[in-house]
Image (cartoon, rainbow, N blue to C red):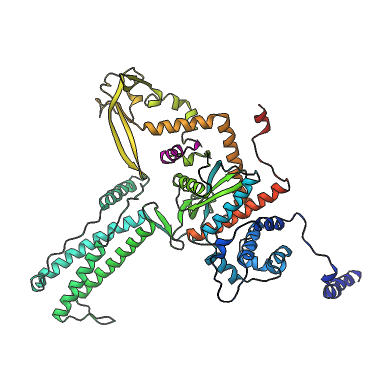
Amino acid sequence: MLKQDYYNDFFEIGQQKINFSFYELGLPNDDPVYTLKKVMEELDFSGLLACYSDQGRTGYNPIMLYSVVTYANMRGVRAVDRIVDLCQRDLAFIWLTKGQKPQRDAFYEFKGKKLTGEILDELNYQFMRRLHKEGLLTLKELYIDGTKIEANANRYTFIWRGSINYHLAGLLDTIDTLYTKYNTFLYENGYGPKYDLGQARMFVIEGMDKVRKVIEENRRRKLTKHKKISNHTIIEIDNCSPLEIIKLQKNLKRIAQGEGTQFVDGKGKHKPELQKLYEELEECGKRLMEYKECFEIMGKDRNSYSKTDLEATFMRMKEDHMLNGQLKPAYNVQIAVENYFIVHSYVSNDRTDYNTLIPVLEKHQGAFGDVLEAVTADSGYCSEKNLIHLKENGIRSYIKLQEHEKRKTRAYKEDIGKHYNMTYAVFEDEPYYLCHDGRELRHIRTESKEQDGYCQTLEVYGCEDCSDCEHKARCLYKYNSEKNPDRNKVMKINERWEELKEESHANIQSETGILKRQIRSIQTEGHFGDIKENEDFRRFHYRSEKKVYKEFMLYAISRNIMKYHRFLHQEIEKYEGKKEQKGA
């Protein structure tokens, strides 16, 4: 009975008669919302305010909306509906909105139409300059890393370049048959001389020869149960190919009008031969235009995309829901960090990290000038193009080489066929190498080739006579004494690339380089650990590269303010390496 009284007192009497005015409600003095307000007070929002008009009815304050969205991300909330709910129930949000209750339409319009990636970059850079003045940043070094975050696209809506190439080859065979059928139709009925129509010739699409060779090779491999090879030849279907089919259709229409042939449709009606040929050509033309559109969406840098997010590329993710190497539509997210703060963010649909380094460096130069002195990154960023860019801009490279671990092995050091295990010498200004058998490999010629928009220079060295050499099997790559008994040693060396690699390798092996690699792994990978594991940011809410960048940039800014809040309250301090190693 006593239990029932307690129940009635609480739910029927207490809850109905409680008066909130008697309770002193307030936020803790160390709430992050006060740090947010402190940061907002010194930012210049002129770029954001320029997106609004002075005419018409006054809406919600855009600075207030930005503060609410940023604070929501600081609290780990990204869904708009959840933000709307918090603006009505949470004290910190009510304090930020001053009691206003913006609805979901206001936030969608603000994030979708008013807030741009450029505005977010500028606001973040203003905050970075403030941190620089307070001594929390130097802006002279960057620690860069990337991760793949799943796009808001259906998993099984993929379009593959190899698949399109395969079906395109079959379509062209069908079109070729229709061309023969068209010519036969004109010849048998005498329409060619009558309407002054010449014989139609099948058009040629460049690159299809390579595609057909791969298709035949894969058919042979299927019979022998070997793994298929990729068919990623870039095909460009110009306007000529679909227009050629349209010309044939126009000719058939002209014949139909001249002969009084009517096109029919519906049950019980027999289509004339001319109409059947016309419709077959029309169907092939539509398919050809669809393939052309797919190639245009993919461009030359991608081999896949999703139907529900055309800018997302299918990538191999560490989170595999089927545990079989399933590819998912995703974006490649890059961050450049210093002292735990995300200085730059960059989002692309490139599966690799090679092409993401230079855009990040250009953003840093555009925002802060030529102040950058060092860049630290993992082996995914090691390419000749990137190291050349760092060299030309006077930036010290602490990028791990792709063969960093391989260099430690005995096989690498004892590979006598590689130039780095040979003796390099110069005689009368002519360079040459001495192989393991003591024979000279002299300079033969210089070759050059285009690679990713820049020119690679290769120096070719060769031995005049490798006969009777007992190390020939170990020195020559895939040497077969029966097929090529007179084969001599020839090697191509990119000397500029080798020099850049050795310089970067020496940097990361130094004490400073070891320390920087520690800092990079702790700070950048620590961010991604928090993002994916602790805050469960594994999938974007928006589609298209611009909207995805805005979503991540809002999140990055909120993380920076939270890091600043923790610095102010002495919860974290600048990482300067492990103490025991530093003392040693």
Q: Position of residue 203 (x, y in %)?
A: 21, 59
The residue positioned farthest toward the right in the image shown: 2
Residue 136 is inside the magenta segment: no
Left or right: 266 in relation to 259: right
Q: Can residue 552 be seen in the rendering of this structure?
A: no
Q: Residue at x 64, y 71 (%)?
A: 102
Q: Residue at x 60, y 70 (%)?
A: 104
Q: Position of residue 332 (x, y in %)?
A: 49, 51
Q: Quadrant of residue 489?
A: top left
Q: Quadrant of residue 388?
A: top left
Residue 389 is inside the magenta segment: yes
Q: Quadrant of residue 535?
A: bottom right
Left or right: 304 in relation to 197: right
User: Magenta residues?
Assistant: 384-400
Q: Quadrant of the N terminus?
A: bottom right
Q: How many marks?
A: 0
In the rendered image, the vertical position of residue 461 relative to residue 138, given as above or below: above
- Asked whether 492 or 70 is in front, the reply is 70
Left or right: 273 in relation to 400: left
Q: Position of residue 212 (x, y in %)?
A: 27, 51
